[in-house]
Each structure stands twice: as structure tokens, then as C-alpha cells.
Image (spheres, helix red, strand yellow):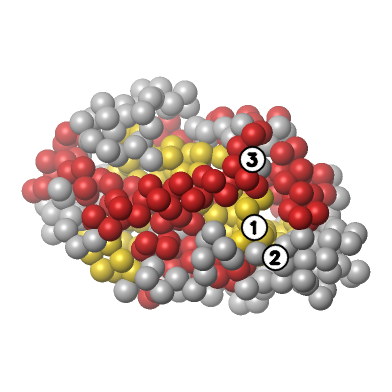
Amino acid sequence: MAHKIDATARPSGSRWQSRYRAGSILAATALVLGACTGGSDSSPGAGGSADGGGDAGGYPDGPITFVVPFSAGGPTDTVTRLIAEPMAAELGVEIVVQNVEGAGGTVAAEQVANAEPDGYTVLMHHIGMSTAPTLYPDLPYAPTDDFEPIGLVTEVPMTIIGSPNFEPNTMEELLAYVEENIDEVTYANAGIGAASQLCGLLFETATGLDVTEVPYDGTGPALDDLLGDQVDFMCDQTTNTTENITSEAVKAYAVTTPERIEALPDLQTTAEAGLEGMEVTVWHGLYVPGGTAQEIVDALNSALLTALQDENVISSLGDLGTAPVEQDRATPDAHAEHLQSQIELWQPIIEAAGVTAG
Ligand code: MLT
């Protein structure tokens, strides 16, 4: 099957910002500043390395912007906000979370690739960093060359879920229903390069079914529409779906891990449901622009390592079906190796499926 989807048609300019202050739990949850400002707030604080060029002197001495490539309220956003608070405390400065949506996460990645390499603009991205080079023939950045990895953060299982009034109740019923109603059934995702798009591609490959995709700027808004029966089914990360599955607000068909997960013990795996090769977890990592000074990379990595040992981070991620990565994977070297191996893993799978962004 060959797909060509105009992923660049998605809106690319909407931005949300929230601020996380060192030592302030209230500030971490309350402030939302400048919705849809259309501008980037990545300038260093007074006395920061305004001339860029990787000068580490005195870093950090002003707010740091964490750029999230998908909508507020979605899985990437959730993970970012969870670690932003303890990282802000550790670094002793404010962290501003900014959602820069569009084109399956590539708009945000391009913005950070082109930002000053001064440590004040940091990208949180996921598995999409490794699939974009194959999906986007004209990708305006190179994931392995134009960034310095800071460290891996977490690996999140995905779940296949259906809208509350979607007819199928089991995976068997889902497959039969989709086959019978192939022209009507809709599958929500967050655009070409999103984890939900990759998971849908694996579903199509495993089942031979070619479903109609409805792209959003993130699975936060996609899940809202699914809950409202506007779209039929989707694949999404447990950080976004666990509560809706346990409260039975959505239909749940399978989890994409080799084993069942603790947060959703009754949910069968894709392998149990007979879907071959449909295992995927969504790894997340932090990046700064290429050319950033080693001292800055080290300072951010040290704060990340501390954040991943934070009790609130561990228990919140646990409730959402995941956990921080082990400390030896939250390093620049381990992250760089993982990125390279994931690019090599996904390239032939995507090429075989014939998917490109046009
Ligand atoms: C999001 O944060 O909205 C997701 O990570 C989107 C996706 O990749 O499916």
C-alpha cells in the first residue's frame, strides 16, 4: 500500500507557553502565558550567552524554553511538564514550556535546530525524531548532526482505543468492523512523523487494512474528538489514555508492548490479539542545537538525571503506564546511540510501507 499525505497542510503556528519556576509547585501547574502568541520566547536572561556560539559562562542565568512539538495536553507535553519542575529546581531558573505544533513535530525541531546554541532553547522530542528523515524527503535539519542530545527521558507504551460509541468492543470485532466499513472508518493521528501515525502504519501493515487518517496537531485534541465520537479509533500513548481506559470512557483493544503493563493489567497485548510486528514504545529525549558547549550539555544532563529520580516524576509516570529510563540511558552518548539505531530500525519499515509526506 502506498500513502502520500500532505502533512505540511497542518497549521504550524500555534503556541502555548507555561512557566515552571525553581522551587514553586504552584507556578508549575498554574501559569499559562501568551496563548497563540505566534512568537518564540527563547532569548536568554540578562547576562546570558546572548551572542550564542556555545559560551557556557554562568549558565544558566535566565529562563530556559522547553519546546514541545505537539499540542498542550498531549503525551509529549505531559512528560515535558512533569520533568520541567524538578529540572527548574535543579538549575535554579525558570523553565518555560512552549508548544510549537505542525508537520508531525518537524516545525518545532527545525525551530530548535536553528536556535542559538546557548542552552536557552531545548527540544523535547520523541520517536518521531528518528522517523522524520525517512518520512520527509526534504527535512530541513539532520537529527544526528544538527542537535546535541542531552539524554533519554522515558519510553511510553501505546494503546489502540476506540470512541465511546464505536461499535467494536474487542480487537476481533475491530478488525472485522474496519474491513466491512473501510470507506467510513476514521483513524486519528498527530500527523506524519507522530507516534500515533507510526503505530497506525504498523496496524495497517499487520492487518492489511488501509484506513482513512484524520491528522491533528497532537493526540491531546485527537483524543478530545475521539471522546466526542468525532473519529472512530486511534493509537495513543498511555500517558494520554490510561485514565480514559480505566474509567471505561473509551474502548480499549490492545497495548503495544511485548508484555501486559502494570497500569492496565486487563488489557491484552497486540501479540496476544494476533497482530504481528505491532510492538512499539515511544521514547522521548531532550536536545539542544548543535554546537552547544559541553558544559551546557552537562548542566542540562545533570538536571535531567536528578529529575528522573524525583519521587513525583516516578509515581506520576507509573500511574500513566511508564517510568523514567535508567540513569545510564539518560546520557548524551546513550541517547545519540539510541537515535542512530532507531533511524536504522524504522527506515526500512517505513520505506516498505511506502509512506512519505508530500
Ligand atoms: C503528542 O504529544 O501529541 C503526541 O506525542 C503525538 C504523537 O506523536 O502521536
Viewer-nearest residue: 283 or 26: 283
Is the CB of mark 1 within 8 Å of ligand 1?
no
The crowd level at tag 1 (other Cα within 10 Å; few <14, some 14-19, many 20+) is many
Of labels 2 and 3, the one closer to you: 2
- Is residue 132 rendered to the left or right of residue 269? right
Q: Inspect the image, locate mark 2, and give the three-letter code of the amino acid beneath it.
A: Gly
- Sequence-first tag of 2 and 3: 2
Contact check, label 1 and label 2, Cβ < 8 Å: yes
- Is residue 7 rendered to the left or right of residue 140? left
Res. 241 in view: no
Residue highlighted by disc 1: 148
Residue positioned most to the left: 180
Residues under labels 2 and 3: Cα distance?
A: 20 Å
Q: Position of residue 298 (x, y in %)?
A: 76, 49
Is the CB of mark 2 within 8 Å of ligand 1?
no
Q: Quadrant of the C terminus?
A: bottom left
Viewer-nearest residue: 114 or 164: 114
- Is residue 348 rendered to the left or right of residue 74? left
Which labelled disc corresponds to residue 330? Answer: 3
Contact check, label 3 and label 1, Cβ < 8 Å: no
Q: Can you say whether 350 is above or below 83 in the image?
A: below
Residue highlighted by disc 2: 291
Q: Secondary structure at mark 1?
A: strand
Q: Inspect the image, locate mark 1, and give the three-letter code of the amino acid beneath it.
A: Glu
- Sequence-first tag of 1 and 2: 1
The crowd level at tag 3 (other Cα within 10 Å; few <14, some 14-19, many 20+) is many
